[in-house]
Image: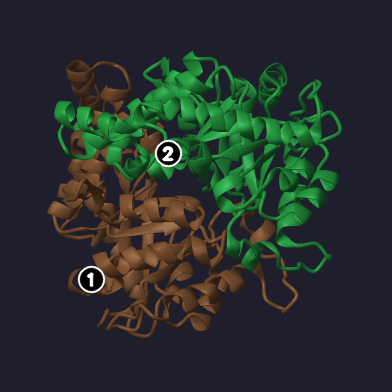
Chain colours: A green, B brown
């Protein structure tokens, strides 16, 4: 089961965090951008190749410290198919370096279409009897608004490929409560109902460390809900965005973990990618600055939760 | 406003339908596939190029009959970045032929990330002061689970680019009711609340025919809800999936329209793409068969709703 592999990486590195790779051109050192434009042109291709080079430097610096990366599809699609190729190449490079890859796509659709997303992002695409990994991530974020038949096709692929999904439950943004916090008839909120569905969907796909292949996205910016959901959903692994730039701190994310320091992975994107700008160091040190920030984040969280055991 | 352009195309062709381009290899004539594999290899690239050739044939045959296409991202992502390039090329080709393009991506995320999706799919991406259209569709389907701040960045891009969005309200799949039909405290269902938000989000972006840039996805498979939503959401343009292969018929979709035959566009994907297989005609006739099916669908719907006036 996919989150077993993630748990093992987290325990072996003693680091329950994931580096969000949501690169913008403004985060990328000028030297990398200039070299890319000279080679590929000042266009979508040149921009996409700059993103890829930036990511590779980060992955090299982080792969011995951080167990996972989370590339956000939007920041690649923004640069067209050339950007999407950079997403593919980033995923492949991170996996070569032994990292666990969570593609943040928040995909959702009806069953037959979800089968295509599952195949593309987590599974193998068949072309006349031969199989190809189109993107080949270890996990994918998804949105459960369409209910069970938009989730089931993913579970079959997860099972076959040792992959996992994270379903949006309580998101980190300011307006997440507009729909998610609304009370349903049976005294539960929309996000609680979605969490309950995660436990149900995951039940047949349980890993050896007590977590299923169906995880949940729960924002660091709502620590009270995070605490309640941790208790209510004992078999659901949490992906926790919102740390750092969005306002979440180590105290806020501590309730996401179980007693062994397991069950959750905390994402930081801008904090890590832009560490060189925040530190004010030379741009050639961007990857080293990212690693320093990753260590600070790891230490701040470990100080709250202690040693992580399997 | 974007749906003004769509309304004008619908009225000029007297056809309120959209051809869903969700190609699978099994829908594509063997001759097209074989030629593509010979040129590009039996791999993701060969498959993606076969999709593109198939789509171009359909667009050539349909552009004088059907006002719009709706490519579904999943079926392109399934073939990797090569497939996503075929999506880009399909959009560009359809727009060259004067068709309105709805990219069916059901995208959703927090505000800053949604800005990137909006830019990529509907807007212009800036690279060092120069602008490029990464995908350049006329409209994008989105999921509103994250609330207002996941929608607002889209509206700015829609306004600047004369584009529109369709928010998932009541989807066509069997389990859509699990969450969407649940009753909230104020006596409305989740899908009704989402529909109400569409009216609110769209209010500042009203077009000359009475519809805003914020449309809604409402499935043909739930005709009663479709009828109620048409009444409740007078300024919300409907994209209606579920006609044909999913079970919806002309009677079911008639309630989606206003008294002038406006306010909605009905999608058919498999019915049109696979018409040649259903008719049992020669594969070289696949595009002509698609056009014949598009005419049958148009005539069946027009027989229910009468002449479309602006």
In the picture, measured across the screen, residue A94 lies left or right of residue A298, that is: left
Q: Write down the quadrant of residue A40 in the picture.
A: top left
Crowd tier of the residue under label 1, counting other residues whose Cα lies within 10 Å: few below 14, some 14–19, many 20 or above: some
Q: Which residue is mark 1?
A: B5
Query: Is the N terminus of chain B in the top left, top right, bottom left or bottom right quadrant?
Result: bottom left
Query: Is the C terminus of chain B in the top left, top right, bottom left or bottom right quadrant?
Result: bottom left
In the picture, measured across the screen, residue A177 lies left or right of residue A53, that is: right
A300 over B238 or under it: above or below: above
Pick the residue in front: B231 or B73: B73
Q: Where residue A15 appears, x then y in whole percent?
A: 67, 26
Q: Secondary structure at mark 2?
A: loop
Pick the residue in front: A44 or A223: A223
Q: Residue at x 82, y 51 (%)?
A: A228
Q: How many marks?
A: 2
Q: Which mark is residue A280?
A: 2
Crowd tier of the residue under label 2, counting other residues whose Cα lies within 10 Å: few below 14, some 14–19, many 20 or above: few
Q: Secondary structure at mark 1?
A: helix
B39 over A34 or under it: above or below: above
Pick the residue in front: A247 or B51: A247
Q: Where residue A50 appears, x then y in whole percent?
A: 29, 31
Q: Residue at x 75, y 38 (%)?
A: A236
Q: Where residue A22 appears, x then y in whole percent?
A: 44, 40
């Amino acid at each position: 089961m996919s989150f077993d592999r993630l748990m093992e990486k987290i325990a072996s590195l003693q680091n329950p965090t994931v580096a969000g790779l949501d690169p913008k051109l403004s985060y990328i050192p000028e030297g990398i951008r200039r070299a890319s434009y000279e080679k590929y042109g000042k266009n979508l291709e040149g921009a996409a190749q700059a993103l890829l080079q930036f990511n590779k430097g980060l992955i090299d610096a982080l792969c011995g410290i951080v167990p996972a990366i989370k590339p956000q599809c939007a920041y690649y699609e923004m640069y067209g198919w050339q950007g999407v190729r950079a997403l593919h190449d980033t995923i492949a490079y991170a996996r070569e370096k032994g990292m666990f890859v969570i593609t943040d796509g928040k995909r959702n659709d009806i069953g037959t279409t979800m089968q295509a997303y599952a195949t593309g992002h987590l599974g193998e695409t068949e072309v006349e009897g031969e199989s190809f990994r189109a993107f080949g991530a270890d996990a994918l974020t998804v949105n459960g608004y369409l209910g069970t038949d938009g989730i089931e096709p993913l579970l079959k692929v997860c099972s076959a490929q040792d992959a996992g999904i994270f379903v949006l439950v309580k998101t980190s943004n300011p307006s997440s409560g507009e729909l998610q916090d609304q009370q349903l008839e049976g005294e539960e909120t929309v996000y609680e109902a979605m969490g309950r569905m995660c436990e149900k969907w995951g039940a047949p796909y349980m890993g050896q460390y007590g977590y299923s292949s169906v995880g949940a996205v729960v924002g660091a910016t709502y620590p009270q809900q995070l605490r309640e959901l941790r208790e209510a959903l004992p078999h659901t692994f949490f992906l926790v965005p919102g740390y750092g730039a969005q306002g979440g701190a180590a105290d806020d994310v501590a309730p996401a973990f179980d007693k062994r320091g397991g069950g959750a992975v905390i994402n930081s994107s801008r904090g890590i990618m832009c560490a060189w700008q925040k530190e004010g160091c030379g741009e050639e040190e961007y990857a080293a600055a990212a690693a320093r920030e990753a260590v600070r984040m790891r230490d701040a969280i470990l100080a709250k939760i202690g040693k992580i055991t399997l």
